[in-house]
Structure formats: structure tokens, C-alpha cells
Image: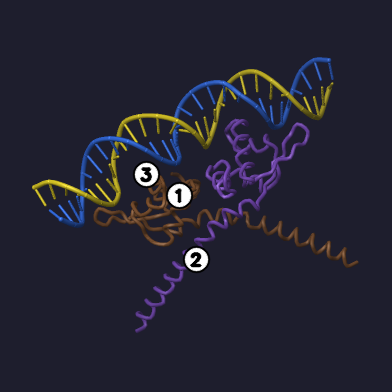
Chain colours: A purple, B brown, C yellow, D blue
DNA sequence: TTTATATAATACCAAAAGGTATTATGTCAA
DNA sequence: TTGACATAATACCTTTTGGTATTATATAAA
């Protein structure tokens, strides 16, 4: 995987993986525990967990025959930061809207 | 495409598409103009633009034989909002770190 | 009216994704 | 030690993705 950013966006592209992250935000889980929440095989869940781990969105700790999957929320920051670049465009739009409304109010009051 | 969220995350998954959004943040562009920034065919660029339009990240306006592609930054908000859910985990981690540092400083000063 | 240009629409291809099923391996427990 | 269990590793299948190349259509310009 080239950039961390790419690993994160790739991981977030699949709805099952986004749901997994949500589940892991409540508590650490084994593969079996994660699988309980989905209608797909454990093998499929494992593949999703592997992609999440590649994107550094989770860490995995071996504990006996189990593997504990743990959310690493900091990794989401690179995606959040990328999106943040567009923040000022949202704000600009908001400002434009505000200006338009104010202008209309002025017209209404004239 | 089911949820708007899925459309957005799907669109963001490809690095070329993320770059296209960056370019469109500077100005509206025709397909040809967008293509100038990449080493792939116009056909390939057009496909990326279609996926971006499906995710409502851009709008397209016909102008003669050209198609003007325009960034719709509001659409990125659904992704930003999804990520925002994890914000408190970052903050929690930050707080934990802060607490640890403070604790260490107290130790150092004792 | 030609002719060039911008995009649309297809057909096609290779690789990646998302899934299943099966087999192998390591570990806990009786 | 033996059996059950959690996960790993493969092999395999289908669909989607990212790309090319080619052809068609609409519009601008000579």
C-alpha cells in the first residue's frame, strides 16, 4: 500500500468494514464476535479485518487461540484531514447563502 | 447506489478521483481539461467523473459540445459526519495522553 | 456543407474485490 | 492424548473496477 491515506480510504469504501469499525468502537472483539453481527462467513469477515489492519484502522493482538481486534481511531485522521481541505468550500457556500439571505431581507425591508 | 454515504465513500476510494476533486476545487473544468492532469485516456477520466457524479460529489452542466464539471463540496459532508463519530475517541486518546503527561510531570516534580 | 472537436457509448480485457468452501494449524480442555 | 475450537491458509467463483480502443453523435468552425 502506497500512502496511508489510500489504505484508509480503501478500507472505508466497503459498508461492512465501516460497520465493523462501529462495532469495534464499543469494545475489542475476536473474529468470532465480529462475525456474529454479519450474515457472511468468518472467512469473509477475516478478509475485511485484514484490509482494516492494512489500513492501520485496527490492531490485532494474539491471545491464545484468539485474535483480539482493537480499533485504532487515530488512523481515521488522515481521511478526516483530507476532507478538511474542503471545509472552507462548505463555509464559503454557507457564507454565500448567508449573504444572499441578508440581501433578500434588506430588499424585503426596503 | 443505496445510501448517499456509500456513494461518497465509494467515490473517494480511488486516488485519481480524489485528485480530480482537488483539481475541481480550483475551478470548473471540461472533461478534456481534467484529462490534461492525468496520463490515462479521456474515456477513463470520463468513467471517474461518472462515479463522482453518482456520488453527487460533482454536478455536470452541458454547454454546447462541452460538459462543465463542477465540484459539489457539500456532498463530502456525509463522509465527514461519519468520521466525526470517531472524533470523541481521538479526543479520549488525547485526554488520556494529556493525563499521562500531567501525571508524569507531577511525578517529576515530586 | 465539410471538417474538426468534445463527448458518449460500446465492446473488450486484466486485475482486484467480495464471497464460499475446504483443509491445516495451534491451543484449550476433558 | 484426544477432541473441540478459533483462526489461518488456500483454492475457487463471480462481479466490479480501472483501463484501452473503437465507433457514433452532436456541435463549432472553415
The residue indicated by pointer 2 is: A88
Residue at 38% x, 43% y: name it: B44
Distance of label 3 from label 1 (alpha carbons): 14 Å
The residue indicated by pointer 3 is: B41
The reply to the same-chain question for discs 3 and 2 is no
Distance of label 3 from label 2 (alpha carbons): 32 Å
Q: Is residue A73 left or right of residue A99?
A: right
Mark 3 and mark 1 lie on one chain; the one further toward the N terminus is: 1
What chain letter is assigned to the residue under label 3? B
The 10 Å Cα crowd at callout 1, few under 14, some 14 to 19, many 20 or more, is some
Residue A74's x, y, as percent?
65, 53
What chain letter is assigned to the residue under label 2? A
Asked if residue B60 is positioned above or below residue A98 in the image, the reply reads: above
Q: Nearer the viewer, mark 3 or mark 2?
A: 3
What chain letter is assigned to the residue under label 1? B
**Dot 1: element:** helix
Q: Which residue ends up furthest to the right in the rendered image? A: B110
Is the Cβ of the residue at disc 3 closer than 8 Å to that at disc 1? no
Q: Using the image as rendered, state which of residue B66 and residue C27 is in the foreground.
A: B66
Residue A33's x, y, as percent?
68, 37
Residue A1's x, y, as percent?
58, 42
The 10 Å Cα crowd at callout 3, few under 14, some 14 to 19, many 20 or more, is few
The residue indicated by pointer 1 is: B17
The reply to the same-chain question for discs 3 and 1 is yes
Asked if residue C19 is positioned above or below residue A101 in the image, the reply reads: above
Q: Is residue D11 left or right of residue A98?
A: right
Task: Give the total of numbered labels.
Answer: 3
Rendered image quadrant of residue B91? bottom right
The reply to the same-chain question for discs 1 and 2 is no
In which quadrant is the C terminus of chain A drawn? bottom left
Residue at 74% x, 34% y: name it: A66
Amino acid at each position: 500500500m502506497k500512502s496511508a491515506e489510500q489504505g484508509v480510504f480503501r478500507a472505508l469504501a466497503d459498508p461492512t468494514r465501516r460497520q465493523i469499525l462501529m462495532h469495534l468502537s464499543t469494545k475489542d472483539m475476536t473474529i468470532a464476535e465480529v462475525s456474529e453481527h454479519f450474515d457472511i462467513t468468518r472467512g469473509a469477515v477475516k478478509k475485511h479485518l485484514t484490509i482494516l489492519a492494512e489500513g492501520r484502522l485496527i490492531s490485532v493482538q494474539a491471545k491464545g487461540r484468539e485474535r483480539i481486534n482493537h480499533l485504532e481511531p487515530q488512523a481515521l485522521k488522515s481521511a478526516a484531514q483530507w476532507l478538511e481541505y474542503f471545509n472552507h468550500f462548505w463555509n464559503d457556500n454557507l457564507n454565500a447563502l448567508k449573504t444572499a439571505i441578508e440581501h433578500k431581507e434588506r430588499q424585503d425591508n426596503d
